[in-house]
Amino acid sequence: MNESFKALADPPRRQIIRLLRDKDRTAGEIAEFFNMSKPSISHHLNTLKHAGLVQDERQGQFIRYTLNTTVLDEVLGWLLELTDSVQGNNRRQKKQEHSKSAKPEE
Amino acid sequence: MNESFKALADPPRRQIIRLLRDKDRTAGEIAEFFNMSKPSISHHLNTLKHAGLVQDERQGQFIRYTLNTTVLDEVLGWLLELTDSVQGNNRRQKKQEHSKSAKPEE
DNA sequence: TATATATTTAAGCAATTATCTAAATATCGA
DNA sequence: TCGATATTTAGATAATTGCTTAAATATATA
């Protein structure tokens, strides 16, 4: 969970995620979108992979990356708990009186 | 946006956010939950404040912190775009063929 | 098998971050 | 106004991060 949040806390990595939302891409294709060396992109991809946000699969010479939305859903869940939270919550700011759920921890 | 993500990418800060979800608290009350010096907590609170995730208000001797879910909703929106996304999306992994929305950019 | 292409790993460095202690500031209450 | 309490600001330092170039690895193809 922490690794996921940390992985998301970097603009190039979020950009990569958005690129993979549209379609799967090879490391080289991803690198083309950036003004950054390929090793740097490779490093970012590795960070995303370790966080479980992307998966990779070698296809011959290339390595194709895909988005794994499962982990994104977890992050989403953490955040939802704070806003919508469990039940009837009018959302948005001001006085809160949440009803706690089975605590998720972390 | 980036500041929000970065603010969330740290366990103590996420813990603070969770504490404030339950109810508003003073800096000192928050600090009691941690094994960390008060200046460190103060610094984290400042980070969260700059990211717009919390607000503070002096109440006499104390400074009371409150959660601002508005910014959390923005982060939430960013993530939702990747999973649920715009319309009919069966969610979860595998082959994607999203219909792009008005791009949000970051 | 030799060469070219795709990608990662290694090594190093500068910038950022998280933390601490000490000192400063603000408010309360006698 | 003085001392106690609450909190932040300053200054320092160690750890982490993001980036680079050079080298290594894996696959394809001639």
Image (spheres, coloured by chain):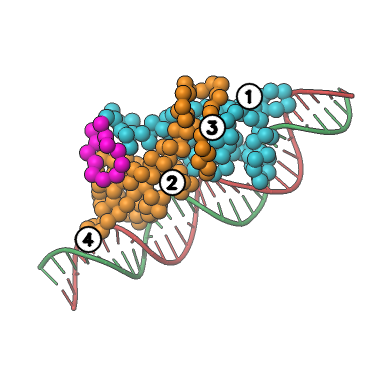
Chain colours: A orange, B cyan, C red, D green
| Residue assigned mark 2 | A4
Which of the marked residues, 4 or 3, is nearer the chain's N terminus? 4
- The numbered mark, 3 or 2, whose residue comes first in the sequence reads 2
Closer to the camera in the image, B56 or A97: A97
Picture residue at 32% right of the left edge, 52% below the top = A55
At label 3, the amino acid type is Lys
Q: Report the magenta stretch's main SS.
A: loop
The region drawn magenta spans: B88-100
Query: Which amino acid, mark 4?
Result: Gln
Residue A56's spot in the image, x, y percent? 30, 54
Is residue D19 found left or right of B24 in the rendered image? left
| Mark 2 vs mark 1: in front | 2
* Residue shown at 56% from the left, 24% from the top: A97
Residue A7 in percent (x, y) is at 43, 46
In the visual, does B96 lie left or right of B32? left
From the image, tell me which residue sits under label 1. Answer: B57
State the separation of the CA atoms marked 4 and 3.
51 Å
Give the residue drawn at x 67%, y 28%: B63
Determine whether the residue tagged by mark 1 lies in a helix, strand or loop. strand
Q: Which residue is mark 4?
A: A61
